[in-house]
Image (spheres, rainbow, N blue to C red):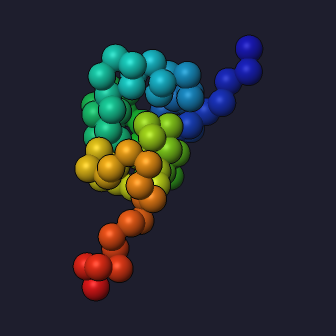
Amino acid sequence: MNRVYVCSCFGITEQQVKQHADDGARTPRAMASACKAGTDCGSCVRRIQALLGRGACPRHELAEPGAPALAGLDEAA
């Protein structure tokens, strides 16, 4: 079996992260509550975000479908 570790501090695999996400842990904070991943050194938090589909835009749930992840940032400046 080929295991891809996401969190080496707690031995959490990519498959375990996906399973916790399927069970409802859909944010890095919820993932930390579910399995402690991301709570020690923190080096896995970006990978967890990417697996949860939150890598490009932290507030992706507010973005319109099909819109670029960084759309509208120039308007705020």
Residue shown at 56%/29% (left/top)? 14
- For image coordinates 39% across by 19% down, the residue present is 22
- Residue 16 image offset from top left, x and y in percent: 50, 22
53 horizontally vs 5: left or right: left
Q: Position of residue 76 (x, y in %)?
A: 25, 79
Q: Residue at x 66, y 30 (%)?
A: 4
Residue farthest to the right, as pictured? 1
Give the left or right position of residue 1, taking residue 45 as reference.
right
Query: Is residue 41 in view from this perspective?
Result: no
Vertical relation: 5 (above or below) 22 = below
Counting from the top left corner in percent of width and height, residue 27 is at 32, 38
In the rendered image, which quarter contains the N terminus? top right
Residue 70 can be seen in this image: yes
**Residue found 47% across the figure and 27% down from its top:** 17
Q: In this view, does 30 lie above or below 20?
A: below
Residue 67 appears in which quarter of the rendering? bottom left
**Which quarter of the image is occupied by the C terminus?**
bottom left
- Where residue 60 sits: x, y (%)? 34, 49
In the depicted view, which residue is nearer to us: 2 or 64? 64
Q: Which of 54 and 31 is in front in this view?
A: 54
- The extreme bottom residue here reads 77
Rendered view: 70 above or below 34:
below
